[in-house]
Image: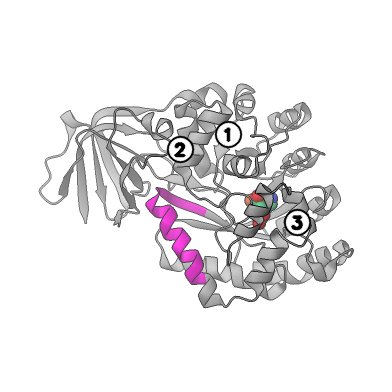
């Protein structure tokens, strides 16, 4: 099936194949074509340009986009979409004055979600997750990473990863899976962190790798969770199984995790709400991509990742939702982009680049999504008739999206 979108007010994020990740000043450039056309065939973008060179095709269905913008779908490179039940009670506890750490100490937090997930069947878990996946697709997400980490037993971690695998099989949007058994030390292993870690490395990881259920390995490198030594063990074990590395680091404390991850060649370091100059220096020395999760800062009322400072240091930046039941119960990337502008002082151009083009590199999907490029997937957002693309983050509470196309198909 061929579709020709015409009279597009501006076609945003048009890039040549093979373009590099954007760093520093280059992040403020959002290339666009005004009064444009976009031609797609099956699941791919085959052509685009200014209306004056639009093809005269009779085979394509023609869709008039007068007054509307088209931009590539969001790439959400960090989510915990697979979970069971909700944690509204903890939300109310926090309003009553308890901190995220207090709640975790009481057996809430990640362990609370693990208990629920362990007791949930594969089918129910799939159904609960699918609702969220459909929701984020409607909100314009066209590629997503999903983590395990609410299982914390061999069977429950595998169950989570199999849910992700089933979603990969049933949906056309690119999905990447991350193995995060080192998300918290389960109750059964209280004061036996080393034993749990050995079980993760020697028992679960080989099963995961053998069945090809993960693309990445992750660890929650944080005080009270996993320290530098644990993190190094995990990363190296994952790498032995050919898993690339993405880590949760510097959410509450900075103690060298960024440097470690960067030296070990991690693909991304995510969170970074607490970032020292040493951390920035470590990032500048390597190729590890910093990922900010402003939804978490908003929801937990913790500092925002210093995204402005990161960009001003000539580094790349990626934005993701961290969709999870505890610290960021929303996968709305439109809101994430708005938060990055309002709270992190990114310009709309930088924020859109961080959530589309740069984000594709955080998932090794730069050849498939993230920009309007010939040969990439036909995955894009058509806005309503809005005055400017800057309206997207400006009108933060409005739904500016008219429709979403993913891999050449209209999402209804
Ligand atoms: O990315 N920080 C660790 N993990 C999640 C939150 C997990 C939870 O509270 O359930 C995060 O914020
Ligand atoms: Fe997370």
Judging by the rendered image, the residue that carries numbered circle 1 is 317
Residue at image coords 72%, 72%: 153
Q: Magenta stretch mostly in which secondary structure?
A: helix
Quarter of the image with the C terminus is bottom left
Foreground tag (1 vs 2): 1
- Figure check: 332 above or below 171: above
Q: Which mark is residue 18?
A: 2
**Residue lying farthest right?**
191
Residue at image coords 50%, 71%: 126
- Figure check: 93 above or below 71: below
Residue 80: x %, y % from top left: 59, 57
Does the segment drawn in magenta span residue 252?
A: no
Residue 58: x %, y % from top left: 10, 48
Residue 274: x %, y % from top left: 73, 35
Does the segment drawn in magenta span residue 139?
A: yes
Between 316 and 150, the one nearer to me in the picture: 150
Tell me where the magenta segment starts and ends, as one range: 126-144
Q: Earlier in the sequence, mark 1 or mark 2?
A: 2
Q: Is mark 3 within 8 Å of ligand 1?
A: yes
């Amino acid at each position: 099936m061929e579709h020709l979108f015409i009279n597009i007010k501006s076609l945003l994020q048009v890039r040549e194949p093979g373009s590099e990740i954007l760093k520093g000043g280059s992040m403020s450039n959002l290339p666009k074509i005004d009064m444009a056309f976009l031609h797609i065939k099956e699941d791919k973008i085959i052509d685009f340009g200014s209306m004056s060179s639009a093809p005269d095709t009779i085979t394509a269905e023609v869709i008039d986009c007068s007054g509307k913008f088209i931009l590539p779908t969001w790439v959400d490179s960090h989510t915990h979409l697979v979970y069971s039940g909700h944690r509204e009670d903890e939300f109310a506890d926090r309003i009553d004055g308890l901190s995220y750490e207090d709640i975790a100490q009481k057996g809430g937090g990640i362990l609370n979600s693990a208990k629920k997930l362990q007791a949930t069947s594969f089918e129910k878990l799939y159904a609960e997750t699918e609702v969220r996946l459909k929701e984020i697709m409607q909100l314009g997400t066209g590629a997503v990473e999903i983590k395990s980490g609410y299982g914390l037993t061999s069977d429950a971690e595998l169950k989570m990863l199999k849910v992700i695998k089933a979603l990969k099989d049933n949906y056309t949007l690119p999905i990447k899976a991350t193995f995060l058994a080192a998300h918290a030390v389960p109750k059964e292993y209280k004061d036996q962190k080393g034993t749990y870690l050995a079980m993760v490395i020697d028992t679960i990881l080989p099963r995961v790798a053998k069945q090809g259920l993960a693309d990445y390995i992750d660890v929650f490198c944080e005080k009270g969770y996993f320290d530098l030594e644990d993190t190094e063990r995990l990363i190296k074990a994952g790498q032995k199984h050919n898993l690339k590395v993405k880590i949760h680091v510097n959410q509450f404390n900075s103690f060298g995790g960024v440097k470690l991850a960067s030296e070990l060649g991690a693909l991304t370091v995510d969170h970074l709400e607490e970032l020292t100059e040493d951390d920035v220096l470590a990032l500048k020395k390597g190729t590890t991509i910093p990922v900010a999760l402003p939804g978490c800062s908003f929801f937990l009322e913790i500092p925002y990742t210093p995204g402005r400072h990161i960009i001003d240091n000539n580094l790349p930046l990626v934005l993701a939702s961290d969709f999870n039941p505890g610290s960021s119960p929303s996968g709305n990337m439109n809101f994430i982009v708005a938060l990055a502008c309002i709270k992190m002082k990114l310009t709309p151009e930088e924020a859109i680049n961080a959530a589309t083009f740069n984000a594709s590199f955080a998932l090794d999907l730069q050849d498939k999504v993230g920009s309007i490029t010939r040969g990439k997937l036909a995955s894009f957002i058509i806005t309503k008739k809005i005055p400017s693309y800057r309206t997207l983050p400006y009108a933060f509470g409005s739904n500016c999206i008219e429709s979403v196309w993913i891999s050449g198909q209209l999402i209804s």
